[in-house]
Amino acid sequence: MGGFFTAIGDVVTNEVTYSGAMRFAALLAFAAIGETIAEKAGTLNISLEGMLLGGAFAGALGMHLTESVTVGLVFATVIGTVVASVQANMSHRLTANQFVVGLALNTLVLGIASFLNTSIQPVSKAAHRFKIPGVAEIPLIGDAFFNQPWPLYLVYPMIPAAWWLLYRTRWGLEVRAVGENPQSADVSGIDVNKRRRQSIYIAGLTSGLGGGYLVLGQIGRFEDAVVGGQGFIAIAAVIFGGWTMRGVIGGCLLFGTVNSFRLTLPTVGHELNSELLSAAPFVVTIVTVTFFAHRTREPRALAQPFVRGLT
Amino acid sequence: MSDQQTSQAAAGGSATAPSRLREAAVAAAMYLGCIVVALFASALIVWATGGSWQAVFSALLDGSLRAPGRWGETIGIAIPLVVVALGTAINGRAGVVNIGQEGQVMMGTAFATYVGVRLGGPGPVVIVCLLIVGALAGAMWAGIASWLLYWRRVPEVLTTLLLITVASQATGYALKVDWLLLAPFRADRSVRNQVSEQLEADTRLPLIDIWGNDFPISAFAVVLMAVIVFLLFKRSVWGFRMRMLGRNARTAQRAGVSTVKYGTTAMLISGACAGLAGALMLSGGDFGNYRFTPGFANNIGWEGLLVALVARSHPVGIVVVAFSFAGLRAGSGFLAATGVEREISQVVLALLVLALLVPPAILFIRERRRALSATRDRT
């Protein structure tokens, strides 16, 4: 047990842990911000994984074609939104089952991305680090927050922007109404399925950008397994956070830190069960939802399609 | 959903509704058109990257049906898909959502492997035991979700989804320690990493050989299962209650159908089916050569879920759809010779799924419009 605590101590006092945690958390946050909005409107958007992957590949492709990170990120955003448009129109215009659409989209994007990856083989590299002077000197966590590849900084303004959109605009109010009680929203003149489609577009936008950040800010090149289930972790973070912006970001930071622990522990010379650490975010999420269900209530119409006159 | 559509069509009145035959013809044409569009889109992707789409489609057909011994392979892959999908159909009818089949398949396989490798005794007894234990393990994993649902109102959509990763990490851990699943070190194998012991020859499901196509005998059991599920839905009080619960939980409750009892049963059966599918995969030999490895489940759970959803929980449809999906999977093995990446089979599959969603949705919307206009005329 003593060994365990020294291990934790070594990791906690290591700057690398925090930088790594921040990079993982940023990816999760990109995806989770959009997913929060989509889930608030009532879609359990399983295609988040596909959106991230599509964004990742488009980012690499954009960089390959123009050698510019900015263009790569724009490409990523566009492709993320394209994936979202399929999900949105299939599940909230044609009212097809959102899980089928999501699963099929994940498969489709993975198939197309790895297919094109082998035939095009895009060349890309990570964006340069940008150190924000002054604040980056804060000991232990300064580097983590303010000395990172520059695409990561895009996530900072997105958090308050998404919060403002959800809680301080008419649109946000309508989105929340649509996710809580679509029948009432419909009666008061809100186009339920339109709001749901729009919220999915936003999810596609942010997670496409997240995919672009993953390739252009963190890893540097595209591989088929580059996303590897992080979309599902982001969904878990949204649930863990109880569908509030603050909680969701907290969840992203927590899961990012756990992931970073898993990678840093071996480098400082300690062994800990890596399966346990990988499963921990999910177990913690389930336990949280179980015991704090009264505080973290999911949107009431989550994952329920809306057709006027039925139900 | 289909019952609702027909009842609405009836409510719409005979004046506006066209004849049944024409309806069916329109639906068939729509399905055909959508499938053609999906195949055309796949061909376009192949063509755009410089491949030959004729070669790809003919390789897919060769690999799934035409080449010697291949349709046996396709049947072998279809077996777990059908089993997973039948379970999913049951919980779908009961209105409980389970999207964690992938994890339940893994748990089923892991427990089945443990029993199959450790339990000595006559072969047939071991086979039966490992199938039962596999089903129980799957049911246990789904049971966690339904227990949390009825104890603390935790949405089962979330728990089943989250439990997939937990299952994958748990089985991955079990494959790392000797006293659980990891095969003991042997000199003839260089890698000793996350692989279980192979099932003994007498604890494998017997294979049937028809014209050089061999597949496990479980194929017949699976068809029988589909028939049983069909009859349960159509002819039994139990199936009727399940359907009532799925259609309108409040009415069902008033009519004396316990939500907790029937919901839990549906979830447990669904999980048991997924676990059983894992055990059948292990003992059937078409996956992983009778060994359990971390990537063993290989998306069969997800694909089985897709089968059930595409077939709209209809047992006959499930068998047909599962066979076509399995054909794509088997056929992808033959793509290497054409110089086109095997991922294209995934693209074809996904496009087909999306295409198959469109006709029922359009038909449904048309029925809705017709019903709405009919009520407008009356008032």
Image (cartoon, coloured by chain):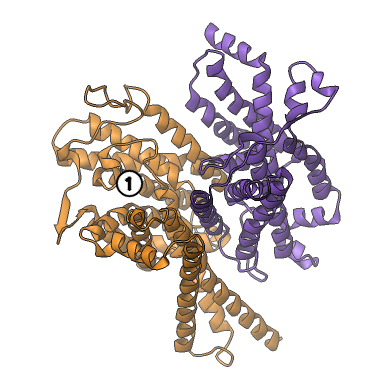
Residue B82: quadrant of the picture: bottom left
Colour of chain A, in one word, is purple
Query: Which residue is nearer to you in this view: B244 or B163?
Result: B163
- Quadrant of the rendering where the C terminus of chain B is positioned: bottom right
| Res. A284 image quadrant | top right
The residue under the point 67% across, 70% down is: A308
Where's residue B312, x and y in %?
46, 65
Question: Which residue is painted at 46% across and 71% down in the image?
Answer: B35
> Chain ID for label 1?
B
Say which chain is orange. B
Q: Residue at x 55, y 61 (%)?
A: A97
Residue B228 visible in the snapshot: no
Check disc 1 and report its element: helix, strand or loop. Answer: helix
Identify the residue position indicated by label 1 in the image: B276
**As drawn, A165 above or below B239:** above
A153 is higher (above) or lower (below) than A37? above
Tag count: 1
Q: Is residue A265 visible?
A: yes
Residue B322 x/y as whole percent: 36, 60
Please provide percent x and percent y for residue B90: 42, 57
Image spot of residue A157 (x, y percent): 81, 40
Judge by depth and name the residue closer to the eye, A31 or A123: A123
